[in-house]
Amino acid sequence: MRDGPIDGGTGLGGFRRYTWWSLTGTVTVLLVLFVADWAVEQDVPLPVRAAGGVALAVLVVSVVILLDHRLPRTPVAARPGPPAVTWLAAGGAAAAVLGAIPLALREQELWPLAPAVMTSIAAMFLPPPHRRTLIAAAVVAAAALGGAVGMVAGDGRWPAATAVPAGMVAFVAWTTLGMLWAWDVADRLDRARLLAAELAVKDERLRFAADLHDIQGHHLQVIALKSELAARLAEAEPARAAAEMREVQRLSIDALRDTRAVVQGYRRASLEDEIANAAKVLAAAGIDTTVDRGDPADARALPEPHRHVLGLVVREATTNVLRHSQARRAQVAYRVRDGRARLRVSNDGVADPSRPGSGTGLRALAERLERAGGTLDWHRDGDRFEVVASLPVGTPAAAAEAGAR
């Protein structure tokens, strides 16, 4: 069993393996022990033993396939879908055979084990209200059938023949559906975390769009009114129309300047702002983030172009964490030592190294840091991914050249 894309640092793949193996292992062991309890008896005819063995094999295979269908390996398919009807029918028929044989052999307490297993597996594919209804109906049916057989047998064991099958059905359902419930909760939490990461990115885009709309909307509205007025005055009052058009020109220049300021504010945010924004966005995505800014004077000692380039590194690394990993913890650390500024962004959710385009943004930033006399490295160590940037505190001219490109 390989889980591939369902893991990525959250442990969800390991939890799936644990749930799958726990359910299939428990069910298989119980069924084998149950069949062996009556199959080894010498007075059981050989055809009956053979039928029981075939039914056991069919039931175990059906359970394995149905559980694999219910606990998918990929997040895209991680919603309960319609069961494999063929295997559901085959498992139901096998469970009926494994229930009928013990009843015929007067095993009045243990006969409902196989039907209880198959009922619980079928209930996994139902919504919770229908699931409870099915389990309750199975408990009542097991109690009624077991009690009726016990009374017909006339051996005085009908109370146990009534209570034990009902309790067995309830216990098997509680065990199997309890494991499934834990899996569903973990899967929903992982989906919520991914959704929070997407929303954090979209919120930032909406903020920028709103700022740009406010600036452009105001200026364009005034420009439209001034242009309309100038058109009306063009023949009657040419001098006034020319003045209005000069005003339109001034407003256009102001609009262009304000638009550039908004864009530069978005693209040239300082290192401090980028670190703060990264912490906020990662926290919104449910990632436990630790920020170590060091001495506040360290950031002020760095030239503004250098802060801009390192800010871009923080932004790119944060975007990679949100889009290409399933991190639970992240760390952003910034220090100035020995005349060099060092920035480190790490997380424990490893991106898929085979993902196309992964690392393209980092490679482009590495070239910009090299032009400024710095370095940018990234590496994967086990379940951790780390981005490390280094720049000299001086050489502002080189930094300005790198930041402008």
Image (cartoon, rainbow, N blue to C red):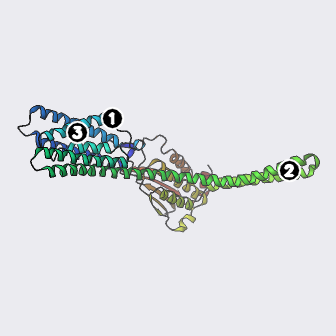
Q: Which residue is mark 3?
A: 95
Q: 7 or 187: nearer the eye? A: 187
Q: Amino acid at mark 3?
A: Ala
Discs 2/1, front:
1
First of labels 3, 1 by sequence position: 1
Give the position of the N terminus as an image quadrant: top left
Q: Residues within 10 Å of mark 2 (few under 14, many from 20)?
A: some
Question: The residue under label 2 is which amino acid type?
Answer: Leu
What is the CA distance from the residue labelled 3 to the residue labelled 2?
A: 87 Å
User: Residue 387: where, in percent of width, then height?
Assistant: 46, 53
SS assignment at label 1:
helix
Mark 1: which amino acid?
Val
Circle 1 sits on which residue? 85
Look at the numbered disc 2 and give the secondary structure of its residue: helix
Q: Earlier in the sequence, mark 3 or mark 2?
A: 3
Q: Is residue 330 above or below residue 232?
A: below
Distance from the alpha carbon under mark 2 to that under mark 1: 74 Å
User: Residue 251 bears which disc, if any?
Assistant: none
**Residue 170 locus on image (x, y percent):** 25, 51
Which mark sits nearer the N-terminus, 2 or 1?
1
Residue 281, percent across and down?
51, 57
- Residue that mark 2 sits on: 229
Disc 3 and disc 1: Cα gap in Å?
15 Å
Residue 25 shows in this picture? no
Whether residue 240 is visible to the viewer of this picture, yes or no, is: yes
SS for dot 3: helix
Q: With 50 as the anchor, is 286 left or right in this view?
A: right
